[in-house]
């Protein structure tokens, strides 16, 4: 490499620059549609006796699934009747069973596809910002009231919000391919009955996106974006103007983090050819000229002056490209190593230790914990402007970016519980590490942070 810079050093420099670079201008919903492949659900076929030819054909159909995000394996077990078991993607760290049924044609088709999922995929592929699915509870008054509120607020948001201005460089770099009619801001709503026989698998998928959703007897609204990714569920009174606005602002805002795993959401199983569904720039669909159209053309020979030394130039260019390939490979290794480390973070951070409690709580669990432990100290580690926009009741504010963070949190009582949170979970995890190092013995962490707390209808103070 030129200037004595090794490929590994160059890759590290690129990685550092990338972590400090400004966010891309592409809205989250469009970036997710074009670049975020859905996580693979784990499908297990458990059986005791040899599978019949018909059952083997069903396994093959699952293995070459149209959905593209299923990982199928066959396991010998004590089940006399072959069972089809669907589990969360391994990326969720603690995958749970989502659905169980017999290995039949009906079960396989239910897993792979359904009418409403096809409708959602079509809407997303055609450019809608997000599709809001209202999962009804079966109480007409409650369901109609939730639907009316959704329609009113989402219509207002689509008329008053503005999409970010796309940066020309982001378009040139291939971060977005514009549809013929440009990006559009729209939030269609679909209603889903919990008793719809054609959508029972989808109902279970949605309720499994968060651990406690099955416990609520209220309507739940799910914003779905990208390639069938659920942001989160808004339950009952959580379906309100504030939460709808917050979710919409995230979805149409510039993609501040292009790495999917560092963004909120859970993927669904959707049988869709996303590339075909996308209304991309027509230039992407232009056909190449046929060979028969150009076979009569003759090459034009252009003399090259000897001074140009083409062989030397070609060798230099080749070496330059090789250097960049090596740097790119090194960068992939660096990033891969980071994700391997990150995957172990939660297991280490929330591991049980003698004399210490350190737990990762979902919003409902956090609410129950606060109710049972009234002496809990609530710590908000977001920025001052975020804190001013609304916080958990009684929260003390110490930004994780404050140089005096350790000195300030040392004033808290280490013998009392501490519930720590940020906006989405990354900064608060860093805070948990520092609280552990400081000797706190009862640390509770709010999973998905302030965003999930508001989505669950948690009480807040100071919000505008």
Image (tube, rainbow, N blue to C red):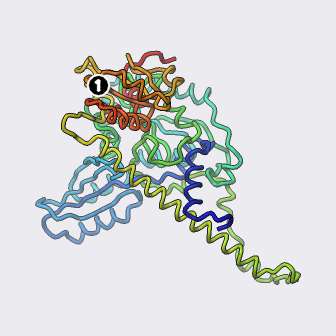
> Residue 4 in the image: x percent, y percent?
64, 65
- Picture quadrant where residue 447 is located: top left
Q: Nearer the viewer, residue 150 or 443?
A: 443
Q: Nearer the viewer, residue 189 or 41?
A: 41
As drawn, 315 above or below 76: below
Q: Which residue is depicted at the point 22% across and 20% down?
A: 372
Q: Which residue is depicted at the point 44% across and 45% down?
A: 229
Considering the numbered disc 1 on the image, is that residue within a helix, a strand or a loop? loop
**Residue beneath disc 1:** 414
Q: Residues within 10 Å of mark 1 (few under 14, many from 20)?
A: some
**Is residue 171 toward the left or the right of residue 305 in the image?**
left
- Whether residue 350 is visible here, answered yes or no, is yes
As drawn, 113 above or below 393: below
Q: Nearer the viewer, residue 94 or 148?
A: 94
> Residue 327 in the image: x percent, y percent?
57, 64
> Residue 412 in the image: x percent, y percent?
34, 21
**Is residue 374 toward the left or the right of residue 288 in the image?**
left
Instruction: Please state, as top left, top right, bottom left or bottom right, where the N terminus lies in the image.
Output: bottom right
**Is residue 313 toward the left or the right of residue 418 in the image?**
right
Q: Which residue is depicted at the point 51% across and 21% down?
A: 389
> Residue 441 in the image: x percent, y percent?
26, 30
Marker count (numbered): 1
Q: Nearer the viewer, residue 27 or 327?
A: 327
As drawn, 60 above or below 151: below
- Whether residue 190 is visible here, answered yes or no, is no
**Is residue 97 toward the left or the right of residue 420 in the image?**
left
């Amino acid at each position: 490499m030129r200037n004595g810079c090794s490929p590994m050093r160059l890759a590290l420099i690129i990685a550092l620059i990338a972590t400090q670079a400004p966010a891309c201008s592409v809205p989250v919903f469009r970036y997710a549609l074009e670049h975020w492949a859905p996580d693979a659900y784990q499908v297990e076929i458990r059986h005791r006796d040899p599978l019949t030819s018909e059952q083997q054909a069903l396994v093959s159909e699952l293995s070459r699934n149209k959905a593209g995000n299923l990982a199928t394996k066959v396991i010998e077990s004590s089940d006399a009747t072959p069972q089809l078991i669907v589990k969360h993607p391994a990326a969720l760290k603690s995958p749970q069973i989502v659905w169980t049924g017999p290995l039949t044609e009906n079960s396989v088709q239910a897993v792979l596809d359904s009418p409403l999922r096809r409708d959602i995929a079509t809407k997303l592929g055609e450019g809608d910002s997000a599709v809001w699915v209202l999962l009804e509870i079966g109480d007409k008054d409650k369901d109609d009231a939730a639907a009316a509120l959704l329609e009113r607020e989402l219509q207002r948001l689509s008329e008053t919000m503005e999409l970010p201005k796309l940066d020309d460089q982001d378009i040139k770099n291939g971060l977005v391919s514009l549809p013929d009619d440009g990006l559009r801001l729209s939030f269609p709503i679909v209603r889903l009955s919990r008793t719809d026989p054609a959508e029972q698998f989808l109902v279970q998928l949605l309720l499994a996106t968060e651990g406690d959703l099955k416990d609520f007897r209220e309507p739940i609204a799910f914003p779905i974006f990208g390639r069938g990714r659920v942001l989160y569920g808004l339950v009952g009174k959580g379906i309100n103007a504030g939460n709808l606005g917050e979710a919409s602002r995230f979805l149409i805002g510039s993609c501040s983090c292009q790495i999917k795993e560092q963004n909120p959401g859970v993927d669904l199983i959707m049988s869709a050819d996303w590339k075909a569904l996308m209304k991309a720039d027509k230039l992407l669909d232009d056909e190449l000229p046929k060979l028969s159209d150009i076979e009569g053309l003759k090459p034009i020979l252009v003399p090259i002056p000897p001074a140009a030394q083409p062989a030397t130039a070609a060798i230099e260019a080749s070496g330059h490209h090789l250097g960049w390939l090596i740097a790119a490979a090194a960068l992939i290794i660096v990033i891969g190593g980071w994700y391997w480390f990150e995957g172990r973070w939660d297991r280490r951070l929330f591991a049980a230790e003698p004399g210490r409690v350190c737990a990762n709580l979902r919003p409902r669990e956090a609410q129950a914990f606060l109710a049972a432990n009234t002496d809990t100290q609530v710590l908000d580690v977001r920025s001052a402007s975020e804190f001013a926009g609304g916080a958990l009741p009684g929260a003390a504010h110490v930004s994780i970016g404050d140089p005096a963070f350790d000195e300030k949190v040392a004033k808290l009582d280490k013998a009392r519980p501490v519930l720590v949170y940020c906006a989405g979970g990354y900064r608060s995890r860093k805070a948990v590490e520092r609280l552990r190092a400081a000797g706190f013995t009862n640390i509770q962490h709010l999973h998905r942070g302030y965003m999930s707390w508001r989505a669950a209808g948690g009480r807040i103070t100071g919000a505008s």
